[in-house]
Amino acid sequence: MTSDTPIRFQIIPAAPGAHLFEVICVIADPAPDGQVFSLPDWIPGSYMIRDFAKNIVQLWAGSDGRPLAVSKLDKSTWRCAPCAGALELRYQVYAWDLSVRAAHLDTTHGFFNGTSVFVRVHGREQHPHLVDIRPPVGEAYGQWRVATSLARTDAPPLGFGGYRAVDYDELIDHPVEMGSFTLATFSACGVPHQVAITGRHHADTDRLCRDLTLICEQQIRFFGEPPPMDRYLFLVTVVGSGYGGLEHRASCALLCSRDDLPQRHQPEMSDNYRGFLTLCSHEYFHLWNVKRIKPAAFTPYELNRENYTTLLWAFEGITSYYQSVMLLRCGLIDAAAFLEQLGRIATRVWRGAGRLRQSLAESSFDAWTKFYKQDENAGNAIVNYYAKGALVALALDLHIRRTSGNARSLDDVMRGLWQRYGQSGIGVAEDGVEHMAKEIGGAALAGFFDAVVRGVEDPPLAELLPQFGVAFELRPAEGGGDKGGRRSKVPADKLARRPVLGIRLAESGREAKVAQVLDGGAAQQAGLAAGDVIMAVDHLRATRASLDALLVAYSPTDSVTVHAFRRDELLVFNVVLQAPPADTCVLTLREDVDDDAVRALRDGWLQGA
Ligand SMILES: [Zn+2]
């Protein structure tokens, strides 16, 4: 046995109508006392145990054509009886999860992540892994091609055939799409980039490629050329309504709504398209921040149990800040749109009482059971480490810029992390980000991490932003659809007189269904619960669309009668309405800045690097 004997896989979309991939794995030199193998329980980047092995339908093991006994050791792990020659495993994987996290196969296309289909051969993880990706059988599939960032061996470009990975870790980090997708290409800093779009669409791919080129080159130059990969692939699945993204070392898998893509003859930047570019910018930034600047807890990934770290806020939050910074710096959005994006993120944070109960470090650590398994009480109990993490990144950036007169910034922290950890492959210790921030930011950051990362304090934006000529305001929401970030057209005193029930409604359906009851709010005090369907307010019928308008007739402290169904029982509540909380954030450029130092700080932040 040598360390370069490859593990060989073949994957065949054997039964697209039944959503079954057939996988064959050949191990030339199986462990003499019986080979152990397993399927991962989670996919890196999405921190939840998903038990992918539950989708294995049938598994057969054999050697030299004769079947071998296989025993199951736990939900995801098997052991074969010892054999003299090569070991062959054959199994079917049921693939009917249209997300970026698993595998999907039907008669229109196939998609898989390696974590869903390729078993890990224990003790052989460091060996090279070869994959033969076979086409489905039948004339109907004659036009199918393959899009993946896996390195080709004998497969033609975009073709079925041979691919390779240096080890198992790489094998599962290149998702594969097969079908009759649209392909567009561009070059960023000399590196070839592909965009493969699956699903019906009328996207202006020329414009998409132009805009993505700006984003990618901005980020490559930010961390320094050459980039850490020699090719990159955006795998985009278009549906009527959907959203998702997952980062990989040389690609990302995205799920978007059809109208998120730019349409031909539509020159303006729609909100949806801006959102899509923001998602692309986010996943691309992960090329550095989490795929290579990686927590020590993920070095290596343990794929059959939770991997705990208090640092997810730094990988997702800092990335969520830079997703917008990069769009601003490459000119795809202006300062007003940038501040609107930050205002929306801040609104998400300020609207959750959970931010006063759970710290960012705790939210990161418990992501597996809390952030990824949110229930109706999540807003009251936990903080979103993406959103608050982005605000902490913003506060850090402003802190460092202010104390250094714009000579240093969060950019230097990120480049420092890249040089110390990303380029060396050393995992970031739990205090590594804080250490680097303090090296760059100095004594001014004493206490910062205790307060806003390990503690539950709000980031000091109300104090920092005015020093950069930006106003930070909190106002009441206009109604259920108000995502924040924008000034209200309704005067502030009028907004403050609109009473609220203290609930959030489910975002779909005609009914006024309570999704969440806010802690300390009017609904909670009256006894309304998540899942209740509000039928009437003071005997007038309520729907999701009409509830806000029904309440406008009242003032805070008025009492109303609310009829609601809980399951199939009609209940009556006496609700004492409350004044609306000022939980909607608006960041705006102040026009009246006459202090040159403030102007210089603002220009450095919003125009500079
Ligand atoms: Zn992310």
Image (spheres, rainbow, N blue to C red):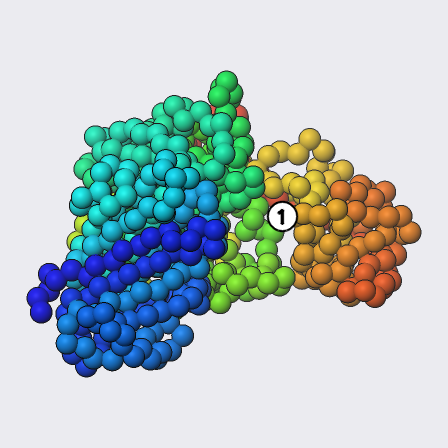
Q: Quadrant of residue 1?
A: bottom left
**Residue that carries the numbered disc 1 in the rendered image:** 583
Query: Which amino acid type is shown beneath numbered disc 1?
Result: Asp
Between 493 and 403, the one lying in front of the other is: 493
Quadrant hosting residue 57:
bottom left
Which residue is at the front of the view, 317 or 569? 569
Q: Give coordinates of residue 27: x percent, y percent.
A: 19, 66
In the rendered image, the vertical position of residue 470 relative to residue 388, given as above or below: above
Residue 369 lies, in percent from the top left, at 49, 67
Query: Residue 242 location in percent, x, y?
Result: 53, 44
- The residue that appears at 71% across and 61% down in the rendered structure is 531
Taking the spot 23% from the left edge, 69% from the top edge, the residue there is: 65
| Label 1: element kind | strand
Q: Pick the residue in front: 89 or 101.
A: 89
**In the displayed structure image, the side of residue 88 where residue 355 appears, left or right:** right
Q: Quadrant of the C terminus?
A: top left
